[in-house]
Image (cartoon, grey):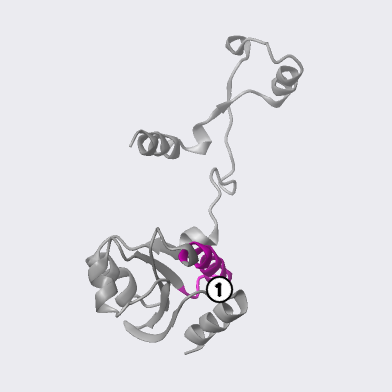
């Protein structure tokens, strides 16, 4: 909880208002690491908007964890884009291998497909509704309908073919 609060505080700081020492003083500080910080004059520096303070990867923009059944309905079933649904479990070894591999392949599609991650221990009703009998189970959904499905682990070539079929289907 404390980590979340700290992260929120850090994220709420705008990069334009950060106060940093001038470059010439930074070079002096690196030579004399014991130089007291109170003696370093601070100046207001504006940072161009093109510079990002935190890195965001395509994985974070296209992959999300399902929170509950209504979230699943809103973000997966009612989605305008094709969605890959990864039913997994924390205790599942093959899930730990397939998950990052699948996220990487979805990220390569550059926003043409989304990925929803569903933990079957937290969302048993969804697993039963979509007839998940083993994990990992991956569904390909388009316009609210399941158009393809596989169970178990796949290599990157098979995952790429699975995604291309979903996008082209």
Q: Is residue 98 magenta?
A: yes
- Left or right position of 101 against 1: right
65, above or below 159, in the image: above
Residue 27: x %, y % from top left:
75, 22
Q: Is residue 140 visible?
A: yes
Indicate the position of residue 36 as horizontal and vertical percent values.
Answer: 62, 10
- Where does label 1 land, which residue? 109
Viewport quadrant of the N terminus: top left
Using the image as rendered, state which of residue 97 and residue 68 is in the foreground: 97
Q: Is residue 129 magenta?
A: no
Q: Of residues 17 and 104, which is closer to you in this image?
A: 104
Q: Main secondary structure of the magenta part?
A: helix
Q: In percent of the image, x 47 and y 74: which residue is there?
A: 113
Residue 38 position (above or below residue 165) = above
Q: Residues within 10 Å of mark 1 (few under 14, many from 20)?
A: some
The one of 106 and 110 positioned closer to us in this rendering: 106
Occupied quadrant, residue 72:
bottom left
The magenta segment is 95-113
Q: Is residue 92 left or right of residue 15?
A: left
């Amino acid at each position: 909880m404390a980590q979340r609060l700290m992260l929120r505080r850090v994220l709420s700081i705008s990069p334009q208002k950060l106060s940093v020492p001038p470059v010439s003083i930074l070079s002096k500080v690196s030579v004399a690491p014991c130089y007291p910080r109170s003696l370093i004059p601070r100046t207001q520096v504006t940072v161009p908007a093109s510079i990002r303070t935190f890195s965001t990867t395509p994985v974070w923009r296209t992959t999300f964890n399902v929170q509950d059944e209504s979230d699943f309905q809103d973000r997966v079933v009612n989605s305008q884009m094709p969605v890959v649904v990864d039913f997994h479990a924390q205790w599942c070894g093959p899930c730990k291998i397939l998950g990052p591999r699948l996220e990487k392949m979805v990220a390569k599609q550059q926003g043409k497909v989304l990925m929803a991650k569903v933990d079957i221990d937290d969302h048993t009703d969804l697993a039963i509704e979509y007839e998940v009998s083993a994990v990992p189970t991956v569904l390909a959904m388009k316009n609210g309908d399941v158009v393809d499905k596989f169970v178990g682990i796949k290599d990157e070539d098979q995952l790429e073919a699975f995604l291309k079929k979903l996008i082209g289907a």
